[in-house]
Image: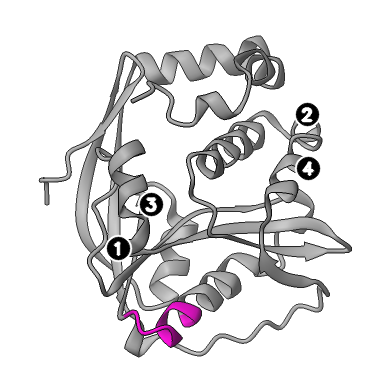
Amino acid sequence: MSLYPGIHTLPKAYIAGQLGVRGMAAMFKEYIFSVNYYYMMKANLKFLPDIKYHNHLNGEFRRVKGEDIDSLKQRVSALPLRDRRDILSRILFYGNGFTNCHGFFVENKLAYMQWLIYPSENHLIESHYPTRFYPLSPHQVMIENAFTFPEYRGYGLYRYFTWHLLKKARNEGYRCGICYTKTERIIPINEFYMLGFKIDKILSEYRVLFRTNRNLKER
């Protein structure tokens, strides 16, 4: 398994060029050694609340295609450094085979993206992220890697489209939604609470010499 799962889908020179010296230095510092804490949260989809989209941002919500991911590469350099890292990680995630990504497009431009991961993708979890995510049971789905482009923040896209995907999963017969979020990310945690999620576990994540491991046995 690659130290950077999915890194083969983007040239290393491209990644370095997009992040620059400061971005690469920050990434190396983080991956040499760091400790983070995550909540694993669960929601019973039977009790998923109704959410209305009140902002009048017109667009289309659809499955993200390979060409949409390719087009993101043209937008990376215009983003702030933190967002550049986030987008690159999502391009790599897609390249690892997690193609069940959905997005909200405004005038054919991707404004928001998010993954809905099914139990049928457990082989990808086991191949690329065995120390980050639990395998999904047959009745579970996982929400992961949401991203809103800066110019579309403040429109309520995160809560509404997370709800939309969970409703889709519920209609397909799935009963439980799973998510992972850093413990200091108060806004996403509050959004998940609004959707009926509750904290199930607290996980420690250790990054040592470019390897990432979450202690999936901890509570």
For the rendered model, the colour scheme is one colour
User: Which of the numbered marks, if any, corresponds to residue 41?
Assistant: 1
Q: Quadrant of residue 71?
A: top right
- Circle 2 sits on which residue? 77
Which span is picked out in magenta?
Answer: 167-174
Alpha carbon separation for disc pair 1 and 3: 8 Å
Q: Earlier in the sequence, mark 2 or mark 3?
A: 2
Mark 1 residue element: strand
Q: Earlier in the sequence, mark 4 or mark 3?
A: 4
- Circle 3 sits on which residue? 181
Mark 1 touching mark 3, by CB under 8 A?
yes
Which residue is nearer to you in this view: 51 or 106?
A: 106
Q: At x 25% / y 32%, what residue is drawn? A: 213
Total count of labels: 4
- Overall secondary structure of the magenta stretch? helix
Mark 3 residue element: strand
